[in-house]
Amino acid sequence: MTQRAAVATEGATAARLPDGAGRQRRGAKQNLIGWSFALPFLVLFAVFVAGPILASLGMSFTDMRIADIRNPFAVDIVGFENYAALFQDERFLRAAANTAYFVVVAMPLTMAAGLAIALGLNQAIVKFRTVFRVGFYLPVVASVVAISVVWRLILNEETGLINGILGVFGIDGPGWLTTPELAMPSIIAMTVWRNLGYQMVIFLAGLQAIPLMLYEAADIDGANRWAKFRYVTLPLLRPTLLFSAVITLIGYLQFFEEPFVMTEGGPLDATLSVSMYVINQFGFGNYGYAASISYVLFLAIAVLTFIVFRFLRPQD
Amino acid sequence: MTKLAAPRLNTESSVQPPPAPSARSRGIWLHVVLVVGLLVMVVPFVWMVLGSFKTTAELRQLPPTWIPENPTPENYRELFTRLDFPRYFFNSTVVAVAITLGNIVIGSMTGYALAKLDFWGKRALFLLVLGTLLVPGVVLFLPQFVLVSNLGLVNTHLGLIITTFAAPLGVFLMRQFMLSIPDDLIQAARVDGAGEYRIFWNVVMPLCGPALATLGILTFLGAWNAFLWPLVVATTEELYTLPVALALFAIGQQETNFGLLMAGSLVVMLPVLIIFVLLQRYFTAGIAMTGIK
């Protein structure tokens, strides 16, 4: 949740960074005052966030195991061995393929569903808009673990809600989470359900920023609804789409609570994600190896985010 | 105006007071679709709440029931007496409150320095905050765990708290908000002889109410729902937070106890859902403040 919020402004704020230009020269006193405000953050941050980012990279080049935890500097450096092993590791390749499958299917579905709901709610005639907004947003704020537990029960083969409803119509529902081919689609459906409310809020904000004037001008030109959507709404939503795509991409590439709770990665590794594999390897005590997996994921996130930025950034 | 004759020009217009018949029928369809969508969103929650009051026998019954035939609080009693949910609830509360306070205090101080003070290294600090806003937890937790265990903090409340006590998001959010506070106000206080710390505390902070509320809610939510770090650091049941306990029940020995898991899920969700329904305007404010207009 905390990670999602802030990417959009990165470009916007970097441009207007006030850096003391034009002000009087800073004195020692000013430096002291400034740092006295910033120091508590800097210390905690350096030790618990910035340090670990580098340490994680360092660990990925060692054979560190759980036994080395008291002497983390006494481990052997193995160079790129972990990374080489990774691409021979069938379970990792399976996890990478599963993660790609999840992102490629769930991301567009979530964005499209959120946009559709936002377009619907943005119509002036919709009544009780707040009720709808709260309803669609509920699963976003609820604990993902609790939601996953409930969906594990909903999708249960014998006594779940879905198969109960199907049973009323005489249909014998399958084991949604126990059939290898169905487990991932089931998790994707749940994920889309859970996250579309967040997309809805972002898209609603984006839609409300589009000047009504533009639609009136399109009306005068005799544009139909599709034309207005295609030539007014979509182009003006571009920054919103970028934000939404980046947030979704970064979040979805790391997905793991859902399979952890709903399927434990099964059946037959069909829902094992990369993040979950990192945690598995950590659980086995293979710290160096786990670090190398996490760094590959980190790199993939950075590269893919960059690509999305290139594709969707506002065109002048 | 018939459907056919309705002028193309204004069917979409939302400012036109009397909607044309075609717009009205579209409005009805729109509402039907949205209501069905809303049902899909809400039914799982309703099913969970109703199910949490059913007996195990009723939950296994075919065809399944909606309304509990013999409503019983047994599942909740079991959570809070036989299982250790009061302790998990206590752990979750302590951890989430501490993390929220930490981020509010440290986020405001650092955000103030970045927005309103001038000092050497400020730009580098800001870039550091920006650059690490989105670093995934899965990259951090391994070295964090090695560090925390060498500090002797594994399986302690402090260990659960310390890694997210000062997160970049809080700094970023407070900086963005404080930029909008007029410099003149701060200058005027300086002219009046107020010290820098007094200005921060008595002049700037009282103006930050909405931003502090938003940051507080977002942080509390994130901390309450956090899973990966508590899962790693809490190695015995005494330190489990609610999501960790619930997840381990769901894949462990309580796996088949549906009523208990539904009641447990409700207990985990309820505080956050109450906060959300009461304070929902701050959630949209949060999205607005972090960049989207």
Image (cartoon, coloured by chain):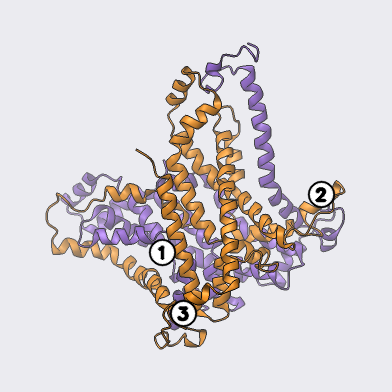
Chain colours: A orange, B purple
Q: Quadrant of residue A135?
A: top right
For label 2, the crowd category at 10 Å Cα-Cα, with few meaning under 14, some 14 to 19 and many 20 or more, is: few
What residue is shown at x 47% (from left), y 68% (from top)? A296
- Asked if the residue at tag 1 contacts the one at tag 2, i.e. Cβ–Cβ closer than 8 Å, the answer is no
State how far apart marks 2 and 1 are (Cα).
49 Å
Chain assignment, label 3 = A
Eye-nearest disc, 2 or 1:
2
Measured from the top left, where is residue B118 in percent x and y?
Answer: 20, 56
For label 3, the crowd category at 10 Å Cα-Cα, with few meaning under 14, some 14 to 19 and many 20 or more, is: some
State how far apart marks 2 and 3 are (Cα).
51 Å
Q: Please state if A231 lies on the left or on the right of A169 as rendered.
A: left
Q: Which mark is residue B102?
A: 1
Residue holding disc 3: A81
Measured from the top left, where is residue B218 in percent x and y?
Answer: 48, 55
Residue holding disc 2: A166
The amino acid beneath tag 1 is Gly
